[in-house]
Amino acid sequence: MPEMDGLEATETIRALDRADAKTVPIIAMTANAFDEDVQRSLQVGMNAHLSKPVDPERLYQTLEELIWEADQRK
């Protein structure tokens, strides 16, 4: 992204004064796959970190988990 990276975007979203800003699912999809990359993604408020190339089954599983969690909050 030309203006900010995904980490900055996540921090900006989580800081918004909106009820859904804290709960909207955010998933990192990146080639940065070191443990510190995963930890940084989670520290800024992302819900999951998927490394490229993305395994479709892992993506579907992650989406299913996040959707289930959202349904449980309702």
Image (spheres, helix red, strand yellow):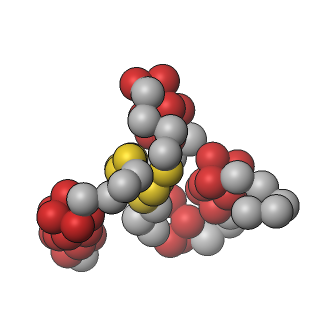
Q: Going 23% across and 67% down the picture, which residue do you hit? A: 56
Q: Farthest front residue?
A: 53
Residue 18: image quadrant is bottom right
Q: Going 38% across and 47% down the picture, which residue do you hit? A: 51
Left or right side of 33 for 70: left
The location of residue 64, given as percent across then percent down, is 17, 69
Q: Farthest top residue?
A: 36
Image quarter of the C terminus? bottom left
In the image, is residue 49 above or below residue 12? Answer: above
In the image, is residue 21 above or below residue 15? Answer: below
The location of residue 48, given as percent across then percent down, is 36, 50
Q: Is residue 47 visible?
A: no
In the image, is residue 5 above or below residue 65? Answer: above
Most foreground residue, 25 or 71: 25
Q: Farthest right residue?
A: 3
Left or right side of 14 for 73: left
Residue 63: image quadrant is bottom left
Q: Going 43% across and 27% down the picture, which residue do you hit? A: 34
Most foreground residue, 9 or 35: 35
The location of residue 44, given as percent across then percent down, is 56, 41
Q: Going 50% across and 39% down the picture, which residue do you hit? A: 32
Q: Is residue 25 visible?
A: yes
The location of residue 2, given as percent across then percent down, is 82, 62
Image quarter of the N terminus? bottom right
Q: Report the number of numbered marks.
A: 0
